[in-house]
Amino acid sequence: MNRYGHFDDDAREYVITRPDTPLPWINYLGCEDFFGIISNTAGGYCFYRDARLRRLMRYRYNNVPLDSNGRYLYVKDGDTIWNPSWKPTRTELDRYECRHGLGYTQITGQKDGIEVCVRYFVPLGQNLEVWDVRVTSHRPAGRQTQKISLFGFLEWCLWDAQDDTTNFQRNFSIGQVEAQKNAIFHVTEYRERRDHFAYFALFGADALGFETARDRFVGVHDGLDKPRAVLAGKCESKLTLGWALVGAHQVDLDLQPGQTKRLHLLLGYCENPQNRKFEKPGVVNKAPFRKVAAALGSAAQVDEHFQKLKQYWSDLLSHYKANVPDRNVARMVNVWNQYQCMTTLNLSRSASYFESGIGRGMGYRDSNQDLLGVVHLVPERARQRILDLAATQLSDGTCYHQYQPLTKKGNTALGSGFNDDPLWLPLSVASYINETGDTTILAQRIGYADKENKDRATLLDHLEISIAYTLKNRGPHGLPLIGHADWNDCLNLNCFSQTPGESFQLAGDISGPKARIAESVMIAGLFCAACQCMAEIYELTRKTAKSRALRSAAEKMRRVILKTAWDGKWFRRAYDALGKPIGSKTNKQRRIFIESQAWSILGRVGLNDGKALAALDCVRQQLATPNGIMLQQPAFSTYRGEYGEITSYPPGYKENAGIFTHNNTWIQIAETILGRGDQAMAYYLSICPAAKERQIDTYRCEPYVYSQMTAGKDALTPGEAKNSWLTGTAAWSFVSISQYILGIRPGPRGLVVDPCIPKSWSGFSVQRIYRGKMYQIEIKNPRGVCKGVRSLTIDRKAINGNVIPLNLPGKQVSVVAELG
Ligand code: GLC
Ligand code: GLC
C-alpha cells in the first residue's frame, strides 16, 4: 500500500487510486499478435506484431505533459468536460480508480454522480482491442434524467511509426479514411501497396456523429485537454484526406438515476488477400471487419472473450505457485514476475514507456534470456522462438544482435560481433530441454542467416558453432575476445569514439588485428556455464565423448580465469585493447565490477578454494546498497574513449555504477551456489518491486514489475528507478527465486530439489506442473538452515539424493523435503 495504490492479491490486480502517479504506470494488452501499452491515465498505443512497422495509434514520446495520446473517452455533461482516465482534460474527479490486471486495464472515473467505467483488453485469437464501456448514473432516485455526450477518441498512426514522426512533407498528404455507420476505417496507403487497414467501431449504441480529422476534432491551436468538438458537443461527421487522422465517435445518452448503459468500441487490424483487396473499385473490402463485428458485436460476446482471457492467465499461472512466508515474494513469484516474463517474451525490448517501439526489435541475447522465464509457461512458443533466434545466427557463429519481429530478419545496420551473443543459445536450449525433455528440437533444420537453404544446419550445429566461435576467438590471455561488447552493451573496448552522436557499439573496427586484444572475463564465465549446459545435453543424447570434451574445455577456461583474471580479492572484469586489466586493484581507483564476479561463480570458478566466497564478500562490501547492488565502483567520472559508452553516463546512472537489476539476480544465484540463503534473499528483496511501495516517491516506477535500473549511490537521485517492464531482470529474477532460492529446478533427469532460503523460514511449498504431472512439494526447515536436503520422500517413500525421478506413476506427485 502506498499513496498511489495497492495490490489486490485475490483479483491479481494492481489498483491505482490517484491518477497523478510519479510516472505513468503502464500495463500491456495482448498476448499473441496484437499488443498495446496502456498507462493508468489511458495513454499509450497498439500495434500488430511490430511496434515500428504496424503501429495503429500515434503516441507522442517526449511530449509535455508526459504520456500523451491514448484511448480516450470524453464526457460532456452540461458545460463540464472530463475523462474517466483524468487525462487529457485533467478535470478533477470525485472518484478515480485504475485496475491493471493480467492482459487488461480497467479505469473508472466519476464526476457529479456520473460514473464511466471502461475496460480495455485484447481478446484471445483476435487482432483488436475492446474498450468495454459502462456509464452509470448514481444520482438519487427522483432526480431528472441526465443527458450526457460521450466521445471515444484516438489518433491514427500512419503504420510505420518511425516514418510517421519524421516524414511530414509526405505524410500530411497521404492519410485516407473511409466511414460507415458506427465505423471508421483507417486505409492510408491501402490504395497502393498495403494489404491491411484498421478500424474503430462502435457497438451497443448509435453514433450521433463521427470525426476523422484531428484539426476539426481537437483544433489546430488547441490541445487534447480542450478538444473543440467535445466543447461544442458535436462532431462534423466528415471524411478527410491527408493531415492528421483521428477516429472519434459521439454517443448521446439519457440516463435515469440508477441506470447503467453499456456500449463498446473495437479498435483493430485486418489484412486482405491481394486479389480481394477491394469490394468495389476504390472501396476497401470490409469482409474481415464484418467477421469481427459478428464475433464481438454484442456485450455477451465481449463478456465471453473477457472470461476466456481471465481463464488463460489463471491456467498459465497454475503451472507454478509458491506458498511462502513473505507476502512480497509471493506477489512477485506467483503473479507479477511471471506476467512480466510473458511480456518480455512478447515484446523483447521493443515497446514500453521507455522503449519507443522503433529503436529495437528482438534482441538476440535478450530474447534468449527471456526464454528462461517462460519455458514452464509456454513451451511450444519457447521452441519456436529458439528456432527463430537460431535462424539469425551467421555461419561463422556470430549472431545478428537484433531482428525485426515482423520479418524475422536480422538487423543489418547493427550487425553482429557482440561476442557474448552466441553463448546465450545453449542456455535457452538447455532450459527448454530441461523443462520439456524434448530433445527432438536439436535435430530441427534451421540454416544460417547468411547461407542458402541448401546448407541448412540443425539446431545442434548452431549450438556447436556457438561454442566453437568462443574458442576460436580468444585473446592474448586466452580469454574470449569481447568484440563490440559483451552482456554490458556499454563496455565498448574497441570503440575509441570521439565523434558526438556516433554509435558506441558500431564505431571502431572489430575485424582487424587490433580488435584481437580486448577480452572479457564475463564471457569466459558464461562460456563455462554454456559448456556445462551443452555437456548435459550431450549426455542426454548419449554423446559421451563430446560431453567429456566440453567439460574439459570448460575446465581449461576455468584455469585461464583463475590464472589471468583473479585479482587477489575478486575477479577482474576484462582486458582493454591495450591489454590492461579493467576491474582491478591495479586500476587507479581499484575498480570492481559485478558481472565477472557473478559469471565466474555461475561458471563454477573458485568454488572450492575460497575465491568465489571472497569475491562475493567484496560485492557486499563495495557494491551493495539497500536498493540493490551497483554495477561497479567507483563510478567513472570522466569520459574515457578506451572504455566507451559506460563512461558516457553521469555517475550512478545506467551502466555507470547504476544498480542494474538484471545482474543483481546473478549475484543472488551465486549466493545460493555458496549456500548463503539469508544474503540471497536480502539481495532479492533489495530490488523487489513490491517492496518498493514503501519508498515510492523516490522509486517512481511501477511497484509491480522490475525496472532495468535504479540510480546508484553516486547519482543525484539514488534509489530512483527507470526503464520499467522490458528488462532481462524479469526472466532472471524468476530463475533466481524459483530455481535457486526456493530451489525447485528442472534438470535433464527430473526436478532437482535444492532450496537455499533464509534460516528463519520454517518452510514453504511449491506446486508445479512439470512434464505433464502436478508436483506438490513441501519443504520443511526444522533446524533453521539455509541449504542442504537431508531427506526426500516421494509419495511417502524415502529416496536417495535430491532429484525427483521422471518415471513415477500417476499424474500427481507429492514430495516432502527436509532441510538440515
Ligand atoms: C540492456 C540491453 C541488454 C544489455 C543490458 C546491459 O538491458 O537490452 O542487451 O545486456 O542493457 O547493457
Ligand atoms: C544503451 C543502453 C543499454 C542498452 C543499449 C542497447 O547502450 O545504455 O542499456 O543495452 O543501449 O542498444
Image: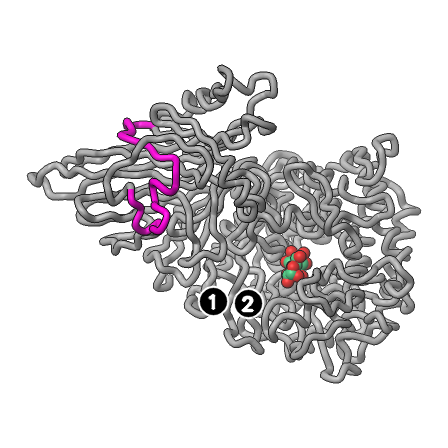
Q: Is residue 661 left or right of residue 523?
A: left
Q: What sort of colour scheme is used for the picture?
A: one colour
**Above-or-below relation of 295 to 92:** above
Tell me if residue 556 is in the magenta stretch: no
Q: Nearer the viewer, residue 297 or 184?
A: 184
Work out which quarter of the rendered image holds the C terminus and state it: bottom right
Q: Is residue 200 left or right of residue 541?
A: left
Q: Magenta stretch: give its range.
A: 203-228
Instruction: Inspect this view and state whether residue 791 appears.
Output: no
Q: Earlier in the sequence, mark 1 or mark 2?
A: 1
Q: Amino acid at mark 1?
A: Tyr
Residue 626 rendering spot, x and y as whole percentages: 54, 74
Tell me if residue 220 is in the magenta stretch: yes
Which residue position is annotated with label 2?
710
**Above-or-below relation of 720 to 174:** below
| Residue appearing at x 84%, y 48% in the figure | 397
Which residue position is annotated with label 1?
699
| Residue appearing at x 17%, y 44% in the figure | 78
